[in-house]
Amino acid sequence: MTAQRIGIEALNVYCGLAYLPVPALFEGRGLDPARMSNLMMDRRSIGLPFEDPVTNAVNAALPLVERLTDDERNRIELVVTSSESGIDYSKSITSYVHQHLGLSRDCRILEVKQACYAATAAAQLAVGYLASGLSPGAKALVIATDVALVDARAEYAEPATGHGAAAVLLSDDPRVLTIDVGAFGNHSYETMDTARPFPGFDIADVDRSLFAYLDCLTNSFAQYAAKVDGADFATTFDYLVMHTPFAGLVRAAHRKMMREFAPAAPVSVEADFAQRLVPSLVYPRIVGNLCSGSVYLGLCSLIDNAGYTDGARVGLYAYGSGCSAEFYSGVIGPQSRTELARMGIAERLAARQELTFADYVQLIKENQDKLTPEENRDVDVSRYADLIGRVPGRPRMLAWTGIRNYHRRYEWV
């Protein structure tokens, strides 16, 4: 592992203003309550009609950008959004995000797509650029952003689907996570486990997706271990963070990895899960799947909830349908908790407004076509003024107000 310090300087997530209790969704849909324990989900964030991939991205990144000096902000030389919720077949989400964050025009902007893996791909490419030394002191901003369009057709995936964005600022001042540069393992191949053939419609082969997730975890870690001398799944990492479609899958994945790489009695496996993985699941269990932001929501959860007092090595696993995956690692410390605490993530999650199932069903109708191209459209943000006012510590947030001549419009509220 190289001694060069590159990694995450700052990290934040935006998970909307409202949530629905998972038991209410099970009851409303007539789903089998016995399956709730397998999901291990308690709540899921719900998007409002004025929230789209641009607003989610900006509202996640704004607290990071506002803490920078003008000189530091101008050192952001690369801005990448990752999304499955594209709003244009040519123009990137990033172009809007770049404008509303007030970033320098002297930077590269682009959008990437590879399901729930894309943000990690962008982050690792950014790490390579920063580590190259071609532009000493440069920073890169990667934002994973999506909106949920699921409905009853998603069946048991509906209770696990989240809403929001994760913003990751990378630099040579890694206050949150120092990445083990060069320590990674990849595994990718083509498979049709999920797809979004139309803007407002997802399809999924659930069994294929679950097996691909588990297969990629085994093989990406094996590649990691082939590059990192002495890497051991059970002993190298003080904590683990995994892409979390639902917390129950992470539990099954951990059990499989322990069986393959560190056989132990079931009681020991359960204790290991509680120690190394449960802290990373606190936020995902009350937010849902943030797609390519999921692993970074889990990292936030780990830092805010784990009991470490010194430096701790974290193994991270990112998976995206289609499929592509990566296992990599980094180090957190007491400073990580201090830096992340500035974002007040737990407080903002607690301040979300609880919705009824009837509220949720109505919002699905309003949200379903927010990615559909239209020449003109109006979005009445004033209807949701009370929810906006509940967000603590945020003087302003970006809202989608409509479309004119196919150009999306936004305002600060």
Image (cartoon, rainbow, N blue to C red):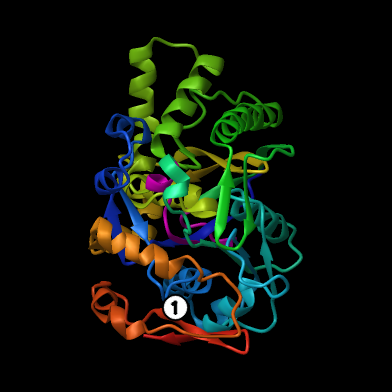
> 256 or 88, which lies in front?
88
Is residue 173 highlighted in magenta? yes
Quarter of the figure that contains the C terminus: bottom left
Is residue 186 highlighted in magenta? no
The magenta stretch is 157-176
Residue 29 in the image: above or below residue 164: above
Q: Is 4 on the left-hand or right-hand side of 234?
A: right
Residue 152 in the image: above or below residue 70: above
Q: Can residue 167 be seen in this view?
A: no
Q: Is residue 85 visible?
A: yes
Q: How many marks?
A: 1
Q: Where is residue 404 in the image (x, y as percent from the top left)?
A: 57, 90
| Residue that appears at 74% across and 39% down | 190
Q: Where is residue 176 in the image (x, y as percent from the top left)?
A: 46, 55
Q: Position of residue 69 (x, y in %)?
A: 49, 80
> 153 or 4, which lies in front?
153
Residue 190 in the image: above or below residue 179: above
Q: Is 370 on the left-hand or right-hand side of 321?
A: left
Which residue is disc 1 drawn over? 66
Q: Neighbour class for label 1 at 10 Å: few (<14), some, many (≥20)? A: few
* Dot 1 amino acid type: Glu
Q: Is 258 on the left-hand or right-hand side of 323?
A: left
Q: Where is residue 343 in the image (x, y as percent from the top left)?
A: 35, 64
| Residue that appears at 61% across and 48% down | 117
Residue 364 in the image: above or below residue 381: above
> 282 or 238, which lies in front?
282
| Residue that appears at 49% across and 24% down | 235
| Residue that appears at 28% across and 48% down | 28
- Element on which disc 1 rests: helix
> 411 or 224, which lies in front?
411
